Amino acid sequence: MARPRTLPDDHFRFSTFRKGDSTYVYGYRNEWDPEKKQSRIAKRIYVGTLNEITGRVKLGKKYLSNHPEYEGKTLYFENRTLVERSEQDVAEEVEQRETSWASNNLSYAATWALWQFASKNRILQNLQAVFGKQLGTNLLALAIYQLLDGGAMNGYEDWLPDNWLPVSAPLSSQRISELLAQVDHEDMVNYFRLRFDRSKENYQRWLEEIEQNAKKNGSVMPPSTMQKMYMALDSTAISTFSMTIEDAAYGHAKQNPELKQINLTLAVDFLNGDVCYAREDEGSITDKSVYKSILAQMKSYGFDLDETVLVTDRGYSSLLNLQNLFNTDVSFVAGVPIVEKGLKDKFAKFREALCDLAFYNSEYDVYCRTIKENWKQNTEGGSIDRTCFVHLYRFPEIALSQQKQ
C-alpha cells in the first residue's frame, strides 16, 4: 500500500550549512524512492544567510522574489523553520539576552589575560583564519574554559555568566557538539601549520637579533647549529571511558591498563614552547610505527622542515626511522636505546674516555665522547654518503648511585 502524501509538493524543510565565515540556510524537499525503499532529497533551494548570534535570516533575492509574502518581514531561523517576529519583540529579546545571562559579579583577570595572550601570539587570528571568525572565537573561548575550569563541556553554559569573555552568549552542550563537529582533521593540520610558520618567523627574528648584537659587541657569532629551529616531538597516552572514539584501543598503558587509550603526539618549538603540530593515533600504535607517517603528513601539508631539527626520545628510534630521516633530508637529534649491540660496543670501546677529565663538562656534570658514523642517503640520483654524529654520555653521579645499589 502506497504511503499517503501529507505535504504538498511546494513544501520545503530548512537546514543550514557553513562555508568560510558565513552560515547559510537552504530548503530541501524529500521524496520516497520505491526501489531503494528510502527517502532522498529531490530538490534543494538557497534561502539566505544566517546570523548565528541573533538567529536572524537575511533572505536571498531569488528566494524573496519567489516568496513575496516575506517582503518587509523580520525572519528568524528556529527549530528548522522560518519564524516571523516584530522589531519590538526582537529588540526586547536582545536586551533581555544581553542582561540576563551575565552575572553582576564577573571575574575578569584570568580570562582577560588569556584572551590578550592568545591575541598577541596570534592564536585567535590563526583560529579565525582556518575555522572562520565565529567558530574560531568560540573554540578559543572553550579552550580558555577548559584551561581554567577543566570541567565537562556541558558546564560551559553555567561557567560563562561568572567569567568575562568577549562572546555573545553561553553555548548549550548541544550547540557545542554541533560546533566541534565542524572541526575536521584537515582544518586542524592547517591551523598548526600556521603556528609552525609563525614559530619559524619568530626564530629567524631572534637569530637576527643575536647576530646583530654579536657584531655590535664584537663577540663570537652563533655556531652553525643555531641556524635551524629545534622542535621537540613526543607523544602521550590518554585513557578514556569513551565508547565512540574510533582511535580508542588497548595499548601499552602506563596508567589505567583496564581502559582503552588514544595517543596524542605534539611537536613543540624549543624557543617559545608553542605547539606547532598535533596528531591523534590509535592507542595500540607505537611511537616507532607512527614516526614515518608523521613526517610524510607534515611535508604533505606544507610544513617546511628544511631549516628545522626534530628532537625525539629513544621511543622513536629504529634503524628504519633513522634511514627515513636521512632519505627525507630532515635534520634530527634522536635518543637511542642503550640495549643496541652496536651502541654497547661503542661504550665498551670508549670506556676510558668517558672517565677522562678531557671529556668532562663541569657545567652539566657529564662526560661526553662524540664519534662519527657513516650512513647512506637514498636520493632519486642514487645514494650519497652522509655523516651522523653519535654522542655517548656518562653521568658520574648517576653511575655512582647505580654502583652503590
Image (tube, rainbow, N blue to C red):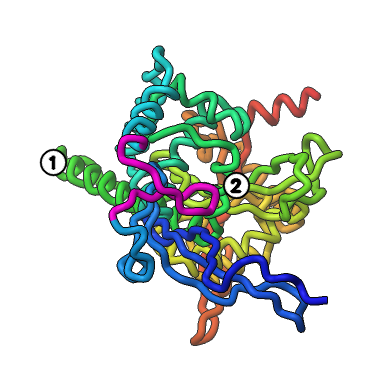
Which residue type does callout 1 highlight?
Lys
Residue shown at 41% from the left, 46% from the top: 55
Residue range of the region highlighted in magenta in the rendering: 72-89
Whichever of callouts 2 and 1 sits on the residue coming sooner in the sequence is 1
User: Magenta stretch: residue 2 in it?
Assistant: no
The extreme left residue here reads: 216
User: From the viewer's perspective, is 155 left or right of 403?
Assistant: left
Quadrant showing the N terminus:
bottom right
**Dot 1: few (<14), some (14–19), or many (≥20) neighbours within 10 Å?**
few
* Viewer-closest of 321 and 371: 321
Which of the 4 quarters of the picture holds residue 96? top left
How busy is the neighbourhood of tag 2: few (under 14 within 10 Å), some, or many (20 plus)?
some
Q: Disc 2 designates what residue?
A: 234
Classify mark 1: helix, strand or loop.
helix
Whether 172 is drawn above or below 345: the answer is above
The amino acid at mark 2 is Asp
Tell me the element at label 2.
strand
Of marks 2 and 1, the one in the foreground: 2
The residue positioned 70% from the left and 41% from the top of the image is 238
Q: Is residue 124 left or right of residue 301?
A: left
- Residue depicted at 38% across the width and 48% down the height: 56
One can see residue 226 in this view: no
Q: Mark 1 points at which residue?
A: 216
Could you say where residue 153 lies in the image, as x and y percent from the top left? Answer: 59, 34
Q: In whole angstroms, how far apart are the C-alphas of marks 2 and 1?
A: 38 Å
Q: Is 369 drawn above or below residue 362 in the view shown?
A: below
Q: Who is closer to the viewer here, 354 or 175?
A: 175
| Image position, residue 204 (x, y; %) | 29, 51
Q: Is residue 204 above or below residue 175?
A: below
